[in-house]
Amino acid sequence: MKKLYFLSFIVFLIVSCNKETILEQGTVQGIVVDKTTNVGIAGATVYLLTHEPSGGFGGGGGSTQIDFTTSAVDGSFFFQFDYDNSLAYTCAATQDQYFDYGDEFPVLEEIKEGNNVEVKLQPKGYLTIHFANIPPSTASDIFGINGGVTDTFYGDNVDTIVTYDVDGNFSNVLHWAVGYGLTNSDTIYCPSFDTTYFELLY
């Protein structure tokens, strides 16, 4: 009878342990990937952060850094820490030639095996534009990328070359206007980690 009780107790412990998620065990394991290709990113600096659940995700909830590490060749990373079920956990990452938007990615609480977080980074592309205006022009000539005003050019004789960091592996929308006239636009696909050249005569 004692042996049966002891075996039942062991089975109970095993079942109880199996009910724990890997986060409840104080483990975060995940991967950093290129947002456009889903390929793992090696050598990224990965941050483990925490905050009150009501703080929200996305870098605006008063996150506190717990630890940091470097992603492996395949983009994988691992944290072991003291889990507190009253807090929410996120991960963020940075790497050269990728935009640092301050995005945080929630660590999933229900995962019992495998990765419980995936961090996605947007790669950079480089767009070099030759601007040359055709008079007359005004002080309010503007140029923008993807909906935002990027530059304003002044004077009647604009002839300059500017290089911008843009979203890589992405069709970037360019728009420009002379004074308050009709806005013109064009779409330029820019591969990651490479420079695309464009001439804008306006």
Image (cartoon, grey):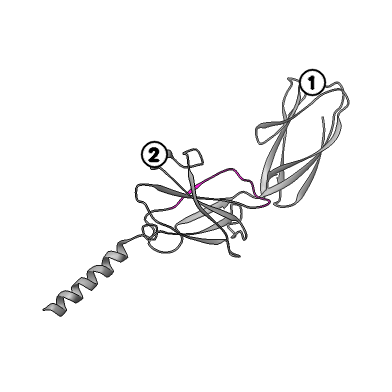
Q: Position of residue 141 (x, y in %)?
A: 77, 24
Badge 1 local density, few (<14 within 10 Å), some, or many (20+)?
A: few
Q: Position of residue 179 (x, y in %)?
A: 76, 20
Q: Amino acid at mark 1?
A: Ala
Residue at position x 41%, y 53% from top?
108
Q: Nearer the viewer, residue 105 or 50?
A: 50
Q: What secondary structure is marked by label 2?
A: helix
Q: Amino acid at mark 2?
A: Ser
Residue extent of the magenta highlight: 96-107
- Drawn side of residue 6 relative to residue 99, left or right: left
Q: Position of residue 129 (x, y in %)?
A: 80, 39
> Of helix, strand and loop, which mostly describes the magenta segment?
loop
Q: Which picture quadrant has residue 176? A: top right
The verdict on residue 104 being magenta is yes
- Drawn side of residue 111 relative to residue 59, left or right: left
* Distance between mark 1 and mark 2 Cα atoms: 47 Å
Depicted 177 relative to depicted 16: above or below: above
Depicted 156 relative to depicted 46: above or below: above
